[in-house]
Amino acid sequence: MNRIEKDRYITYIGQTYNNVQVWGQYERMVDFLFEEYSKTKRRFDEIAQPLLFTISHAIELALKENIKFFEQYVNSKQLTKFENWTHLLKSHDLEALSAEYKIFFHRFHKQVKANKETKSVFNEYHKNLQKLNKILERNAETYRYSEKLDNTGKTIKSSIKPNKKIDLLEVKSIFNDLKNLFIGAPNEMGIYTDYIDFKKNNPEYKKGKGKLYCQRLHYTEHFLENVKETLTKDLKKVNENLWIDQKNFNSYETQVWKNDIYIIEI
């Protein structure tokens, strides 16, 4: 093994700074295991417990990060399924976390008056999440230990029912779909959250109807000119920084803050 090959085994583990990065690593691990272990022709029974733990924990991290994301923007931050935020962050209860996520998404959706289709799509993907939760039946011990113990060390019950059987192809299929829920929901609502971020950091700005034309875009002088050219093609140009959508008569202007471009509905 030469120096370059050996360097692949050195991991800069301390440069994983947040749970979003950890969540991404869990997802890559799941994808890798399914792709590579399938080639061995061996039964998945041999790695089922750690594989299902990895899937479960990836979902747990995704739920917590999504709840935390929407918590930044909702006016009402009251928890429904947990006593407090510490309880939520320490929880492994996927059903309770899933319910809380739905509540926070619906709360924000109503707050910004987003369209009905967005809510409908979210609900459909959330049904898949609930379906997977029922398959996994995951609690604090599931897929980590064979038994649940009391405070004295005595066995209370088995971690998994003896007759439980799981179709991993079904689990992987649903898990793949959930990426649309966990990544798609924040992105879909980005036209509202990006506007809120802009207003928060530019309190002197008095225009705006609460959303953007699209999510914020990375700023360079050249790219801003490209954005303006595209807006001129798609909308009616009024002046150098104002466009009107002739279909619904919404007006838009561009604003630059730090390293981003905001196309704001005014």
Image: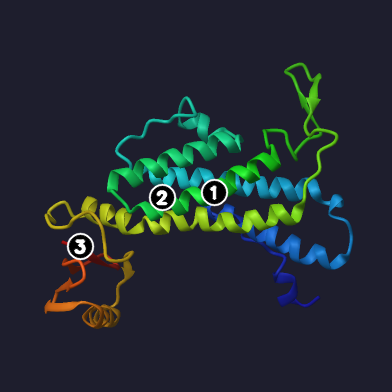
Which residue is denoted by mark 2 in the rendering? 119
Amino acid type at mark 3: Glu
Which residue is denoted by mark 1 in the rendering? 62
Which residue is denoted by mark 3 in the rendering? 265
Q: Residue furthest right?
A: 42
Q: Residue furthest top?
A: 152
Relative to 6, 186 lies left or right: left
Amino acid type at mark 1: Ala
Q: Nearer the viewer, residue 235 or 22?
A: 235
How many numbered tags mark residues here? 3
Q: Where, by quadrant of the figure, is residue 34 drawn? A: bottom right
Q: Upstream in the sequence, badge 3 or badge 1?
A: 1
Residue at x-position 32% and y-position 43%: 110
Relative to 74, 6 lies left or right: right
In this picture, is 251 found above or below 174? below
Secondary element type, mark 1 = helix
Secondary element type, mark 2 = helix
Relative to 232, 120 lies left or right: right
Q: Position of residue 215 (x, y in %)?
A: 33, 64
Residue at x-position 78% and y-position 66%: 36
